[in-house]
């Protein structure tokens, strides 16, 4: 059956309410307007010109996390995030943001994110800020207090960046090195833009893990940002340019899969086909590209062979990324991999289906709602008594770190990307084997 367009899907909502329990914002306020049904109804009224663009409707649309949990729960596949995006586009046409906001957005979305070298330069500056004593001074003088709480919290949980001398480009080719699996295939790593600046180690670990699971790994240097932040902030033209560039770069490679290690990036890459729905000359190429996108955990479970891995006796829990579970539909693979690590105690996280409140830059744009969602999530984390929260997306990782920080759990709970935990566990197993 041909999938419905967002415009068509807007009319298929039968108001059954099956999506209610899945929606994190409805879970917090209990107001129908903060749930999928309410949002579809409001967006529809707006798009049919039955209600005008106003501050209230703008706020209601902005409060949607675009997490897709409702789509997963909906029996007739109503595309709520896409419908909310249509409403946001209409709102943007009618309302100009203040000059400063527009300038900052243009700089961030058009002149920074799409340019890997500029992002790396920003990474150097951040490293300098973290290491030079400037950070200490900024804290001492209370300068951060001039910024909103959410920005202060994010600053506090930023990972320590590697020095520029250690942030070398990722190897363009790494041969597979698994004794058990010589035929896993050849894959390309999508390194992500922010991921590659802030979480370079995770990208390195991803290459190691894939190679040790049997895959040859290539990393094309001319790949660019996936475009997710631009797309969700109404910058469709920039998103299309980035998508075309990525399609061109990866179709030149003879690989079986294109691997993402961040739920947010992977989900956006999977959406390229939908992006080119009205551009027949790109549609086929986008479709071929999308069919190759896989999450790292999924491909290791299906085609690879995870080498022996040993944990440190820690108790871990897993916060799934919404984009990974609902858009990429990767639901079991991460836990399956964790179950293969010896000496690791896994405790399922209650209500792990609900978003953590990060959702791109949602936590900065909607700090109150994001804070309430996170506070509730941390209550569930406490129930597990876990020492380690595992995530599979940089946004979730920073958000969960912010949660650990605001609950004062820094000395007892760590937040770790699943790839880092697996790579370390494999290394530990090797060390144990070599020392007998
Ligand atoms: S969006 Fe889907 S699940 Fe929610 S009320 Fe409409 S039809 Fe039911
Ligand atoms: S996308 Fe997420 S936040 Fe938005 S309506 Fe659906 S479940 Fe709720
Ligand atoms: S931050 Fe994580 S849990 Fe929240 S929307 Fe993004 S992917 Fe989902």
Image: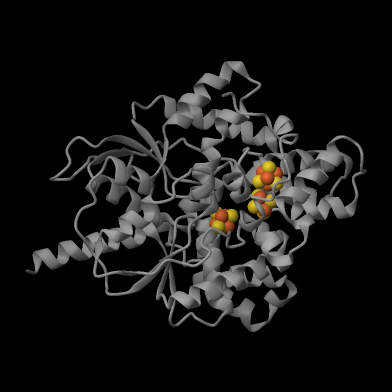
Residue 204, horizontal then vertical, whole percent: 35, 52
**Residue drawn 31% across the image and 55% down it:** 337
Residue 399, horizontal then vertical, whole percent: 56, 65
Left or right of 293, for residue 229 = right
**Residue drawn 56% across the image and 32% down it:** 272
Q: Is residue 103 visible?
A: no
Q: Is residue 13 above or below residue 427?
A: above
Left or right of 117, for residue 346 = left
Left or right of 52, for residue 91 = left
314 or 228, which lies in front?
314
Q: Quadrant of the C terminus?
A: bottom left
Residue 406, horizontal then vertical, whole percent: 59, 78
Residue 341, horizontal then vertical, whole percent: 26, 62
**Residue drawn 53% across the image and 30% down it:** 245
Report how many numbered discs are placed on residues in the image. Answer: 0
**Residue drawn 26% across the image and 58% down it:** 340
Q: Quadrant of the N terminus?
A: top right
Left or right of 292, for residue 102 = right
Question: Which of the colour schemes (rainbow, by chain, secondary structure, one colour) is used?
Answer: one colour
129 or 54, which lies in front?
54
342 or 255, which lies in front?
342
Q: Is residue 1 above or below residue 200?
A: above
- The residue sitting at the top extreme is 281
Q: Is residue 126 visible?
A: yes
């Amino acid at each position: 059956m041909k999938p419905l367009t967002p415009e068509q899907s807007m009319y298929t909502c039968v108001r059954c309410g099956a999506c209610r329990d899945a929606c994190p914002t409805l879970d917090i306020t209990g107001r129908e307007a903060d749930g999928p049904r309410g949002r579809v109804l409001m967006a529809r009224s707006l798009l049919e010109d039955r209600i005008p663009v106003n501050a209230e409707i703008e706020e209601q649309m902005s409060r949607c996390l675009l997490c897709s949990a409702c789509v997963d729960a909906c029996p007739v596949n109503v595309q709520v995030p896409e419908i909310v995006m249509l409403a946001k586009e209409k709102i943007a046409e009618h309302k100009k943001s203040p000059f400063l906001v527009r300038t900052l957005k243009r700089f961030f979305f058009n002149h920074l994110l799409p340019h890997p070298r500029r992002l790396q330069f920003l990474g150097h500056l951040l490293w300098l800020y973290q290491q030079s004593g400037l950070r200490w001074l900024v804290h001492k003088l209370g300068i951060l207090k001039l910024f909103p709480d959410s920005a202060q919290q994010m600053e506090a949980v930023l990972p320590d960046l590697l020095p520029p001398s250690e942030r070398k480009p990722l190897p363009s080719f790494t041969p597979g090195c698994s004794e058990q699996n010589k035929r896993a295939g050849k894959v390309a790593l999508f390194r992500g833009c922010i991921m590659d600046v802030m979480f370079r180690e995770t990208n390195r670990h991803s290459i190691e893990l894939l190679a040790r699971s049997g895959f040859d790994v290539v990393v094309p240097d001319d790949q660019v940002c996936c475009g997710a932040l631009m797309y969700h902030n109404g910058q469709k033209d920039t998103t299309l340019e980035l998508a075309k560039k990525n399609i061109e770069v990866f179709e030149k490679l003879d690989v079986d899969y294109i691997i993402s290690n961040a739920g947010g990036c992977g989900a956006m890459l999977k959406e390229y086909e939908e992006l080119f729905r009205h551009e027949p000359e790109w549609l086929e190429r986008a479709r071929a590209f999308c069919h190759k996108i896989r999450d790292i955990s999924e491909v290791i479970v299906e085609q690879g062979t995870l080498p022996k891995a040993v944990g440190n006796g820690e108790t871990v829990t897993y916060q799934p990324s919404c984009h990974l579970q609902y858009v990429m539909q990767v639901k079991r693979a991460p836990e399956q991999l964790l179950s293969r690590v010896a000496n690791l105690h896994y405790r399922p996280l209650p209500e792990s289906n609900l978003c953590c409140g990060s959702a791109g830059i949602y936590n900065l744009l909607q700090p109150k709602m994001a804070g309430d969602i996170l506070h509730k999530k941390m209550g569930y984390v406490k129930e597990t008594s876990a020492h380690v929260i595992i995530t599979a997306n940089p946004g979730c990782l920073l958000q969960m770190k912010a949660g650990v920080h605001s609950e004062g759990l820094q000395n007892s709970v760590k937040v770790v990307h699943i790839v880092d935990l697996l790579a370390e566990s494999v290394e530990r197993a090797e060390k144990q084997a070599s020392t007998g």
